[in-house]
Amino acid sequence: MLILFFALGSSSLANAQDWSYRVRPGDTLWDLGARHLRSDRPWQQLQAHNNIADPYHLRPGQTLRFPIAWLRLRPAPARLLARRGTVTLRDAEGAASHQAVEGQVLGIGNELATGPDSSATLEFADGSKLQLRENSVVRLDRLSQYGHTGMVDTRVRLQQGRTQQQVTPAKGPASRYIIQSPAATSSVRGTRFRVSAGDAGKHAATEVLEGKVLVSSSLGKGLFLPGQAALQHEGAGPATVALLPAPVLKGSQQPLGTLPIHVSWEPVAGAAAYRIEVVDALIPEILVFARDTGHLEAGIDSLPPGEYRLLVRAVTVEGVEGEDAQAPMTVADAPAPPLTIRPAQGETVSSARPRFEWTRNPQAAATILQIARDASFRDLLAEQSTNGTRLRPDQPLAPGDYFWRVASRGMQGQQSAFSQPQPMTVTDEPVVTGMQPPVARRGQLTIRWQQSESAQRYRVQISRDPAFSKLLLDREVEAPEVALDRPSAGTWHIRFQRIEDDGYAGPFSAPQEFKLPCRLCYVGGGALLLLLAL
């Protein structure tokens, strides 16, 4: 195993050093001993160690030295500061696991695991923070503090995945922060860095963002500075590689904070992929959105209201992540998106300009409708807004598969997240009318067809020729039936058009053919036409 440690944080050096305390007015040796020393160390040993002749008179401002090994140790539990998605906590014995809860206290031996598109943020006793990324597992090996000295000893084990740390600067010689992975052990005394366990064929790496880290193993060692990474290769010492520079963000298509957010950037030489994150503006270790992509753009559809920072970084083929491009984001509180009604999920519509319908949100001033070819809405075809609950696209849609979604716009112009994309299909197949056989009675011809939920009226045309160049009948009716004087014998053609309540007329159905015989046959008191050809 490679060993990565910061020299000042090593255990042997800490044991050889003293913690220094500046005497305050009213301090006594026995009070200081009771407060800071282990129970097996009497205050007289502290007197001898500091060569104090008169234990009853300490001079304010003088320095007392406490050997690190004499200091009292007590537990310093961690706290789950934030969680996103699926985060599982396993107890110290590994026997039981349950969903972790924000604010939960974690002790030695606890194991935290994140699922896909999930993250967790731990805060330790000295204010240091650890961000655990998606598909990662970390175990808490040691959580201790030296009495009331402010020195904290934190040791965690990254079993898989990735972490990012913001370590509070050390307050004394015994302060240390150690994170161990299958390939390395990292010990620092105040810095910001990332650690990768080297999963999925990637190399294990330590990426230094602030401070300094010394990487050491039996095969070599090196001091790593900000902007460098320690890349672990099998059979060799840690190699120094430069972090890729931060991508240059392009001007976004709309202000950052107006959902949906579209972000794009210039390519970075040497990048195999890119990492996009949205973090809390005040506590950047709290991750609220994350995505890996091979493209030079990304969309963010949904975020809770708040102040954020957008981060974009380039990733090498070895999996080393580079410097962050950053941009501030403000997402205002917005009304909830409407509920979609029609077209229903997966519905096939025969209209080139179908009507989209949704529920009314009384807190919204308007609704935004988007139609796209793909579920990610990269291939956006239409975007329209209305203060109503229904809308038709301005331009006709060609036959094919589409997705649609809606968002609310608040009274102050803030926009909500979009609803879930609804798939639909536009077809140019003829409308199925479900026409019944025409009935003739007392010189009248009656034709009925299937009722449509979306139609308020119907237009019916009857003609001798299939091109409908000369019409016997061209009539609008409210019910799905029409009655007319029986025409002369022969072949006739009929077609129907649905007219909706907003006046939109859909396409005509396919012409249907029926024949009137030269004489009527009476069946059951009614005149039934002998032939209906579809």
Image: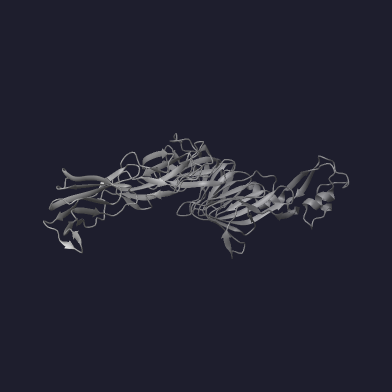
Is there any visible trace of residue 222 in the rendered image? Answer: no
Q: Quadrant of the C terminus?
A: bottom left
Residue 324 picture location, percent across and down: 51, 40
Q: How many marks?
A: 0
Residue 237, percent from left and from top = 52, 50
Residue 69 seen in the figure? yes
- Here the colouring is one colour
User: Eyeballing the image, is 448 above or below 308?
Assistant: below
Q: Is residue 438 left or right of residue 292?
A: left
The x, y position of residue 190, in whole percent, is 63, 44
Horizontal and vertical percent position of residue 165 = 58, 47
Viewer-closest of 299 and 78: 299
Near-viewer residue (204 or 388):
388
- The residue sitting at the top extreme is 251
Seen at 70% across and 48% down, the residue is 151
Name which residue lies at 26% across and 48% down. Answer: 428
Q: Residue at x 14, y 55 (%)?
A: 516
| Farthest-out residue, bottom | 95
Q: Quadrant of residue 527?
A: bottom left
Q: Quadrant of the N terminus?
A: bottom right
